[in-house]
């Protein structure tokens, strides 16, 4: 296919095409122009998208913010105050039951989030008491983490559900003790200057590479009891939940959107 230069395209639009598109005979004149000139009308040469180096299994994208890379809790704090008290073992971040949730020291809005997680290999309990944790975007909107292999529970509370709001399209869970992956696109809610909701939050979630939440609309913060209701807020930290099970996390990174 013919590709014109940037200079030629600009000259063409300003000198040849632009004057005639406002005339009564524009359509006729354009139809007689060479195809590459007609095609140039819809060519955009700027702004150039930012160059980002794609990631690999071991390395996040070049513009990612690494929240946990295997050795440091510097990006985290306890929601109870002070330093995060979870354990680090074999490059993994492990929930230390009873110490409470941990939260990022930085706040975020809309993000692309990657997180890998593993429920305990030893199966203990059932339903919501088996391998339970959660990833809360903005500390309020939860993607459930749970051992959902041969573990009946309410389906809007199983792994990869948007807790109590959206059932996953499929159950893509791997077994206990196996590493699993979430890739999440979260669009934060927007509020007007009057404090009213202008755009609700949405989630798109891939669980182990399988689409399980397809741009679903969130009705408000995910609640354990009662109906969700939005309250005006700005950017907020991301939170990982201590639900009493030693769930492990690794390779946590995000990109601001």
Image (spheres, rainbow, N blue to C red):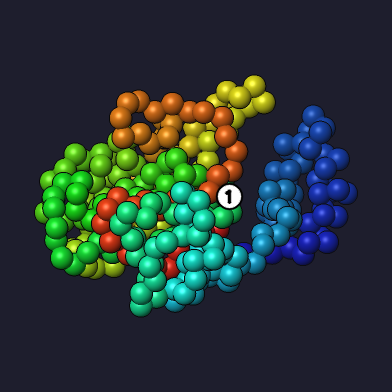
Q: Is residue 39 above or below residue 114?
A: above
Q: Could you tell whether 139 is left or right of 15 in the image?
A: left
Q: Is residue 247 above or below residue 92?
A: above
What residue is drawn where x is 38% and y is 52%?
A: 100
Q: Could you tell whether 170 is left or right of 217 in the image?
A: left
Q: Quadrant of the N terminus?
A: bottom right
Residue 148, given in percent of the width and then of the height, sits at 19, 53
Under circle 1, the secondary element is: loop
Residue 98, given in percent of the width and then of the height, sits at 32, 54
Asked whether residue 209 is in view, the answer is no
Q: Could you tell whether 46 is left or right of 253 in the image?
A: right
Considering depth in this image, is 34 or 220 the residue closer to the camera? 220
Number of numbered tags placed on the structure image: 1
Q: Quadrant of residue 192?
A: top right
Considering depth in this image, is 55 or 51 the residue closer to the camera? 55
Residue 119, given in percent of the width and then of the height, sits at 25, 61
Q: Is residue 7 above or below residue 152?
A: below
What residue is shown with label 1? 107
What residue is drawn where x is 64% and y is 22%?
A: 194
Tell which residue pokes out farthest to the right in this image: 15
Residue 237, given in percent of the width and then of the height, sits at 53, 49
Estimate how packed mark 1 is, as few (under 14), some (14 to 19) or many (20 or more) residues with alpha carbons within 10 Å: some
What residue is drawn where x is 79% and y is 29%?
A: 24
What residue is drawn where x is 71% and y is 59%?
A: 48
Asked whether residue 175 is in view, the answer is yes
Q: Is residue 95 above or below residue 108?
A: below
């Amino acid at each position: 296919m013919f590709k014109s230069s940037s200079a030629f395209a600009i000259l063409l639009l300003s000198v040849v095409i632009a004057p005639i598109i406002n005339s009564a005979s524009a359509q006729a004149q354009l139809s007689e122009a060479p195809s590459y000139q007609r095609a140039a009308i819809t060519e955009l040469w700027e702004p150039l998208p930012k160059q980002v180096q794609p990631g690999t299994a071991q390395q996040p994208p070049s513009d990612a913010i690494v929240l946990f890379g295997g050795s440091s809790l510097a990006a985290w704090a306890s929601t109870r105050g002070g330093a995060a008290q979870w354990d680090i073992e074999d490059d993994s971040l492990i929930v230390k039951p009873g110490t409470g949730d941990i939260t990022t020291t930085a706040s975020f809005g809309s993000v692309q989030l990657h997180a890998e997680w593993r429920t305990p290999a030893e199966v203990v309990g059932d339903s919501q008491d088996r391998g339970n944790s959660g990833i809360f975007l903005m500390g309020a909107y939860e993607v459930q983490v749970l051992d959902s292999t041969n573990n009946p529970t309410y389906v809007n509370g199983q792994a990869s559900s948007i807790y109590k709001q959206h059932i996953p399209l499929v159950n893509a869970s791997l077994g206990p003790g196996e590493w699993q992956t979430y890739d999440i696109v979260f669009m934060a809610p927007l509020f007007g200057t009057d404090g009213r909701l202008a755009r609700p939050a949405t989630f798109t979630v891939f669980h182990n590479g399988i689409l399980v939440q397809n741009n679903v609309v969130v009705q408000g913060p995910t609640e354990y009891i009662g109906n969700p209701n939005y309250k005006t807020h700005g950017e907020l930290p991301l939170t990982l939940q201590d639900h009493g099970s030693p769930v492990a996390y690794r390779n946590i990174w995000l990109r601001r959107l």
